[in-house]
Image (cartoon, rainbow, N blue to C red):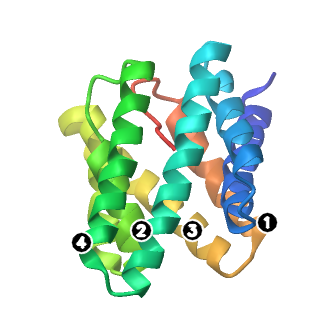
């Protein structure tokens, strides 16, 4: 498979996760997440486990959002801690050497709160720390493309979302050290 086709396929699966989440279709969300990990070279068993954990994390983040809407901040934090636990399991299954679960949880939470400086900071840390001192530029680009994809998703612009995710995946695939966790 040529590289451009691989970026397109990963971007499509990634984009599908966003729309499946909107539809609360968590079974297909888990399948799409699993297919991403299979494409990244993980075993079928690892991919299935990780896909299920990511689907569960999305569901828990929805519960957290409901608690935030009802102004129950303690319950919201409780659910986000459960999301973090799911991501820590993902890191263990994938043998990810740098813990980025907390940054993933943080940007999800801040995205729901629409707190853009903290979304950007946590995405940047998640995407730059795995690369050490050399990761700041790459982390910046990965952060930019993921934010642009999220904004396109919010506007229901599936094509633009997928195009931004293609750029994202092109950068991810070029460096196998990047520990993608959903």
**Label 3 neighbourhood size at 10 Å, few (<14), some (14-19), many (20+)?**
many
Alpha carbons under labels 1 and 3: distance apart: 12 Å
The earlier-in-sequence mark between 3 and 2 is 2
Find residue 35 and report its horizontal and vertical position in percent.
71, 31
Residue position marked by numbered label 3 in the rendering: 150
Q: Are marks 2 and 4 in contact (CB under 8 Å)?
A: no
The earlier-in-sequence mark between 4 and 1 is 4
What is the number of the mark on residue 107? none
The earlier-in-sequence mark between 2 and 4 is 2
Alpha carbons under labels 2 and 4: distance apart: 10 Å
The earlier-in-sequence mark between 4 and 3 is 4
Q: Nearer the viewer, mark 3 or mark 2?
A: 2
Seen from the viewer's position, the closer of residues 46 and 163 is 46
Q: Is residue 106 left or right of residue 157?
A: left
Alpha carbons under labels 2 and 1: distance apart: 29 Å
What is the number of the mark on residue 64? 2
The residue drawn where x is 54% and y is 43% is 54
Seen from the viewer's position, the closer of residues 34 and 146 is 34
Residue position marked by numbered label 1 in the rendering: 159
Residue 24 seen in the current view: yes
Find residue 115 and report its horizontal and vertical position in percent.
33, 80
Q: Please, which residue is most extreme toward the left here?
A: 133
Would you identify the image quadrant in which residue 31 lies?
top right
Residue position marked by numbered label 4 in the rendering: 74
User: Which element type, helix, strand or loop, lies under badge 4?
Assistant: helix
Q: Is residue 59 left or right of residue 107?
A: right
Alpha carbons under labels 4 and 1: distance apart: 38 Å
Would you identify the image quadrant in which residue 160 lies?
bottom right
Q: Is residue 122 left or right of residue 69?
A: left
């Amino acid at each position: 498979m040529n590289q451009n086709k691989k970026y397109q396929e990963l971007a499509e699966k990634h984009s599908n996760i966003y729309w499946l989440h909107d539809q609360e279709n968590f079974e297909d969300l888990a399948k799409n997440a699993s297919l991403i990990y299979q494409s990244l070279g993980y075993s079928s068993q690892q991919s299935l486990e990780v896909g299920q954990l990511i689907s569960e994390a999305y569901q828990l983040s929805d519960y957290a959002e409901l608690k935030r809407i009802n102004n129950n901040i303690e319950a919201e934090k409780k659910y986000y801690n459960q999301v973090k636990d799911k991501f820590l399991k993902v890191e263990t299954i994938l043998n990810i050497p740098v813990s980025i679960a907390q940054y993933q949880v943080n940007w999800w939470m801040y995205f729901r709160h629409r707190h853009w400086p903290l979304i950007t900071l946590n995405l940047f840390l998640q995407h730059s720390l795995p690369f050490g001192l050399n990761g700041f530029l790459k982390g910046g680009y990965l952060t930019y493309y993921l934010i642009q994809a999220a904004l396109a998703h919010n506007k229901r612009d599936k094509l633009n979302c997928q195009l931004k995710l293609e750029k994202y995946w092109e950068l991810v695939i070029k460096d196998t050290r990047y520990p993608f966790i959903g």
